[in-house]
Image: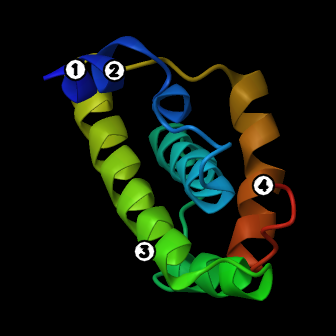
Amino acid sequence: MPALACLLALPLAACVSPHSNPSAGRAAELANLVSRSIACRAGAPRASTLERFLASERARGATPEQVASARSTYVTVSEAATINQDVRPEACAPEERGALRPRMARVRAGDFDGF
């Protein structure tokens, strides 16, 4: 139950320790960006976004265990963000939408260097 409380009470990326697995931390950040972009109608990911991200993590030298953890983290954070948005919708200011669009454009292009 503490994990659920963490997902509901804190920003989702705060529930992942980037120090123990930097790939999982980047995956949480990506999932938050994608979820927020969808909620704000600032762009949607490609169907291959997660696989492309994981390939970039392998290229950074992530171990198979770190890649598996990053995949799990991405899915978990994405699902939690979707549930949270349904339960407690967050409005999206035009400024936020404007900031999200170029970041999602980079993600759609396969550029994950900002994470």
Sequence order check: which comes first, mark 1 or mark 4?
Answer: 1
**Type of the residue with mark 1:** Pro
The residue shown at (54%, 62%) is 44
The residue shown at (50%, 64%) is 70
Give the residue number, with chain letter if any, for mark 3.
68
Which mark's residue is nearer the viewer, 4 or 3?
3
**CA gap, disc 2 and disc 4:** 22 Å
Give the residue number, with chain letter if any, for mark 1.
2
**Type of the residue with mark 4:** Phe
Secondary element under disc 1, as helix, strand or loop, is: helix
Tag shown at residue 115: 4
Residue 93 can be seen, yes or no: yes
**CA gap, disc 1 and disc 2:** 6 Å
**Type of the residue with mark 2:** Cys
Where is residue 16? Give x, y as percent.
50, 38
Where is residue 30? Give x, y as percent.
61, 54
Crowding at mark 4 (Cα within 10 Å: few <14, some 14-19, many 20+): few
Residue 88 higher or lower than 74, as above or below: above
Which mark's residue is nearer the viewer, 2 or 4?
2
**Type of the residue with mark 3:** Ala
Residue 3 higher or lower than 42, as above or below: above
**CA gap, disc 1 and disc 4:** 27 Å
Where is residue 96? Give x, y as percent.
72, 28
**CA gap, disc 1 and disc 3:** 22 Å
Give the residue number, with chain letter if any, for mark 2.
6
